[in-house]
Amino acid sequence: KAANEIYKGLKKLSINVSAVGDDRPVSTVRISPQGSIVATASWTGSIKIWDIDGLNLISTLGKHSDRATGLAWQPCAQNNEPLLASAGSDNNAYIWKIGEEKGKSECSPHVKLIGHQDRLARIDFHPCGRYIGTAGFDHTWRLWDVETGEQLLLQDGHIKEVYAISFQGK
């Protein structure tokens, strides 16, 4: 019975807008905590910022040299400057400052997280917003300081790739 009720509700949904995100498959989509913009990551390595109402492209951030594999928004933006983190198959992670003043977005790299020896699978902010975790195919996950990019913790010893990372408290 509950499944039928859910199905009836889903039948009433419709697509409001749609957009072609990139030339290659889009790997990740994340809505900002403020709910005003959307970030996409793709297999071209591009990270793009879109307005949520019409899915109009606002900005294309710098590009990973291989597939972009993960995105995460900082849960609590400082000074109305949300941070967006991206992970890629190029073994790198980047943290970007995204300006949202008066409908203009100016995007610039904030920090590059260097240390993984193989491609990254996912990335996620700690709920406090001061730390970020990365999971990689080098059989490790790492904890980083968001402001400095310093690696605070290296957790190795996994016998296989680490595919995901998430923090409690979200």
Image: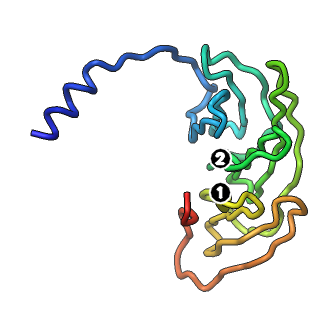
Which image quarter: residue 58? top right
Q: Secondary structure at mark 1?
A: strand
Q: Looking at the picture, does residue 30 appear above or below residue 151?
A: above
Neighbor class of circle 1 (other Cα within 10 Å; few <14, some 14-19, many 20+) is: many
Residue at 74 percent of width and 44 percent of height: 84
- Which residue is identified by label 1? 123
Q: Secondary structure at mark 2?
A: strand
* Callouts 1 and 2 close, C-beta under 8 Å: yes
Residue picked out by circle 2: 71
Q: Amino acid at mark 1?
A: Ile
From the top left corner, tell me how far across and down residue 86 is, in percent.
Answer: 71, 48
**Viewer-closest of 154 and 1:** 1
When asked about the image quadrant of residue 135, the answer is bottom right
Q: Earlier in the sequence, mark 1 or mark 2?
A: 2
Give residue 5's quadrant in the image: top left
**Tag 2: residue type?**
Leu
Q: Tell me which residue sits at (72%, 36%) in the image.
A: 47
Q: Position of residue 87 (x, y in %)?
A: 70, 52
Rendered residue at 84%/41% (across/down): 97
- 62 vs 78: above or below: above
Labels in figure, total = 2
Q: On the rendered structure, is 83 left or right of 30?
A: right
Measured from the top left, where is residue 153 in percent x and y? 74, 78
**Picture layout, residue 70 above or below residue 81:** below
Give the class, few, some or many, for how many residues have Cα within 10 Å of label 2's Cα (few <14, many ≥20): many
Image quarter hosting the N terminus: top left
Q: Residue furthest left?
A: 1
- Compared with 152, 19 (above or below) is above
* 44 lies left or right of 2: right
| Distance from the alpha carbon under mark 1 to that under mark 2 | 6 Å
Query: Where the C terminus falls, by quadrant?
Result: bottom right
Along the viewing direction, whichever of 169 and 93 lies nearer the viewer: 169
